[in-house]
Image (tube, helix red, strand yellow):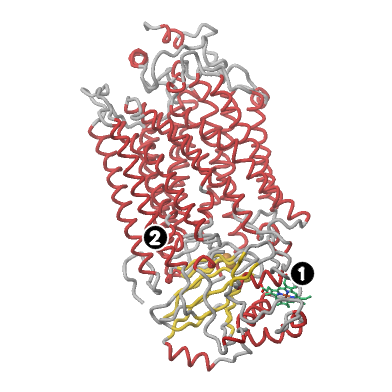
Amino acid sequence: MPNNLPFMPNQGSTLAPHVDALYLVLVAICAFMTIAISGAVVFLALKYKRQPGNEEPQDYKPSTALEAIWIVVPLATFMLFFVLGAIVFFKARRMPDSSMDVWATGRQWMWKFQHPTGQTEINTLHVPVGRPVRMIMTSEDVIHDFYVPDFRVHTDVLPNRYTYNWFEATKPGRYHIFCSEYCGTEHSKMIGTVVVMEPDDYQLWLSGGTSEGSPAAEGKKLFESMACVTCHAAGTGSRGPNLEGVFGTPVKLASGQVVTVDENYVRESILNPQAKIVSGFDPIMPTFQGQVNEAQIMQLVSYIKSLKAPETGRPEAAPAPPANAAAK
Amino acid sequence: MTTDAIDSAQTPRHEEGTNYINAEYGLLSWLFTIDHKRIAILYMISVTALFFVGGIFALLLRLELMTPQGDLFTSDTYNKLFTLHGVVMIFFFLIPAVPSVLGNFILPLQLGARDLAFPKINLLSWYLYVIGALMGVVVMLLGGVDTGWTFYTPFSTTYSNTWVVPTVLAGFIAGFSSILTGLNFIVTIHKMRAPGLTWFRLPLMVWALYGTSLIQLLATPVLGIALLLIAVERLWQVGIFNPALGGDPILFQHLFWFYSHPAVYIMILPAMGVISEVIACFSRRKIFGYKFVAFSSLAIAFLGFLIWAHHLFVAGISVYSAMIFSFLTMFVAVPSAIKTFNWTSTLYKGSVSYEAPMLYALGFIGMFLIGGLTGLFLATLGIDIHVHDTYFVVAHFHYVMVGSVIMAYFAGIHYWWPKMTGRMYPEWWARLAALLVFVGFNLTFFPQFLLGYLGMPRRYHAYVPEFQVLNVMSTAGATILGAGYLLPLIYFVWALKYAPRASANPWGASGLEWHTPSPPTTHNFEDTPTVTWEAYDEKAWLKEAEKNV
Ligand SMILES: [Cu+2]
Ligand SMILES: [Cu+2]
């Protein structure tokens, strides 16, 4: 894969050209400012060199208009940077509507990826070209950071919640994954590879690998074995809310606040149920902190996500969380 | 010698030849001194020692990075080296360097005062600094610490098996040194200005130190708290930052950067003050736009408190808070731009000479331009999502902290060396060192911008082979830079004994510090000077001083 420009990484995702264009605009403006001002410094220092005939400075009246210019012009330029940067940032953070989800878990010092179809991978992630991939990521220990330079994606992976990230690969190939938040001894070895494949090859890969049960299916088993069903049975009279079809919908809390049910909300409901109480219910749900590991939480979340409200019959895809859910 | 000022400067009435250096002898006379000038010298010796310790760590890091695979050190050793490099350079060199060495020496002189407001507290500051630094050295001897100077949780509170608690306590204690210095400076500037020395007649160094002191006083306590909380969580497993104990790891980052972003200005603001003095002196002009430069120091001190979360753009803060912090960060660049334009314009129609301090100052403008503008790349959200925590960031802050702050420190040391020691320094050697520093610095750090955009993360002991060429360039540059730093150490020591003696005002500079002999007497001025001229506008006085060179 040849580099498009010297000192620029490959453009492997739909986002990359936007980030690069922004970068080059800033490089051009800033290089101009640096050269102009340094040039002025050198020129003036030489021109007004102390020498016979120029022992003393010459008098003149400094202009205040000049001060105004060099307050306003830089400010306007910097505001331009802000606006352009924010536009690209929004593009990077808005989750695409139809994406394929991949769960990622960071741990000292490896990455584990879980496909919704059941495949798990260590330090290698297979994805198809031309299809948005949404990463739902968490860490089992310290903070890590999922960074694929060729895709220009970069998100911290935190131990207490999910952070999101997405990319759409544009060219088949192999791309580095780096951990870019210092995480201890082998931080620099916490690297992996994204393998981008043509859709057909990807289908082949999916069918080839040994796949365990899908996370949703595993989650269903847990939901039963951990006795969640005792309170969350479908139908009326249950002690806990019916979880069918809640994912992606707004829920009213006892505090009056309305929140959307997303992965982080479900995660928090399991680990810290007292934090947000659903309106009309008693805070009787016990915490499962310490009884479920990250993989199991992920399976439970996948299961709840897969539960559809009975009325809608066979469901469409669960709606993606709003853009800012990525960061929330 | 016509004016009274000259008389008192050149012919001190007390015993000929006594000054603050030879007023008393013996180690104890130094260790128990309350003379701000002697305390400044104590600081100078201690920060220089730590600068070379931190510098040796840096060279070892660069040696390791010559090759992609980690072959010189183990990963753990490498991680300790970059942690100690950061801790030593930031807490024990950069933060005290300009304020505590140059500020301590020069501030009372520039104000026409006999000392700082609280001379004993000033000595206490130095002792606190030394205790902190010694604890840092003990940590190194015990086996080091591997959290990075940023101490991110929960790694630092739960997962690191190294000497985290003594390290954070060392930082905590050194923090008090910084707080007390800030307090001392603020009171001194308010209360001890010579008659006639109104706020707008103050040298810009004083304005810069005032802004610095405000930050030291207001921000450092937050760092102290954050560091203590780390110790508390580590020692007693109280859940503050570790989610497994019910804490929030990002809370630490907010607390840490609430100090550590303003701390960048604790380093750069006084450096900017030095640059204003040097440029005014060596172009023989009043700084263009004096009031704008003065107020921009306060603006930086204020805005510096509002932008800490720009370190957290990819750490899971919401899109909207990221936008706000990006927006506000753009503003802090404006006062810096004002200063840069005004320094440049000061040269216009001046009478510019190229002594070593001026070479450093002109170099500073270039390096600060690059350091500052690349900071805007990082503040621009769409770029930060790619270059966050890569070598781009490393290059950016080294341009600000090494390329700018250390250059300014060297400019200041050369500029006030005659005042501090009563001797000149070898000018051509100093110019050579300035050149080495400039070339070595750029060769070391410019390639790191490219590495960062290519995607090399920071704090990497080993890296993928395609990054090697740029890393080798960087290491080559570091070698030259090291030589550039070693050279002044040698010729300054030589100059103490062999360089020609300096007159009261060898540069024909303005500022009250030049109205008293070099080196000054213990009480700085025989008579309290009265100021009748605007800042940098002592023409008559200057002409007289010239004749005495
Ligand atoms: Cu990691
Ligand atoms: Cu890492």
Looking at this view, is B476 or B206 the one in front?
B206
Q: Are marks 2 and 1 on the same chain?
A: no
- The answer to whether the residue bearing label 2 lies less than 8 angstroms from the nearest atom of ligand 2 is no
Give the Cα separation between the discs numbered 2 and 1: 57 Å
* Residue A71 appears in the figure: yes
Q: Residues within 10 Å of mark 2 (few under 14, many from 20)?
A: many
Q: Horizontal and vertical percent for residue B445?
A: 42, 53
What amino acid is labelled 2 in the image?
A: Leu
Q: Is residue B313 above or below residue A104?
A: above
Residue B450 is labelled as 2
Q: Chain of mark 1?
A: A
Q: Quadrant of residue A213?
A: bottom right
Q: How many numbered callouts?
A: 2
What amino acid is labelled 1 in the image?
A: Asp
- The residue located at (58%, 22%) in the rendering is B116
Q: Horizontal and vertical percent for residue B272?
A: 44, 36
Q: Is residue B421 above or below residue A32?
A: above
Which label sits in the foreground, 2 or 1?
Answer: 1
* Residue A187 appears in the figure: no
Q: Quadrant of residue B512?
A: top left
Q: Residues within 10 Å of mark 1 (few under 14, many from 20)?
A: few
- The residue located at (39%, 42%) in the rendering is B334
Look at mark 1 in the image and give the residue it sits on. Answer: A282
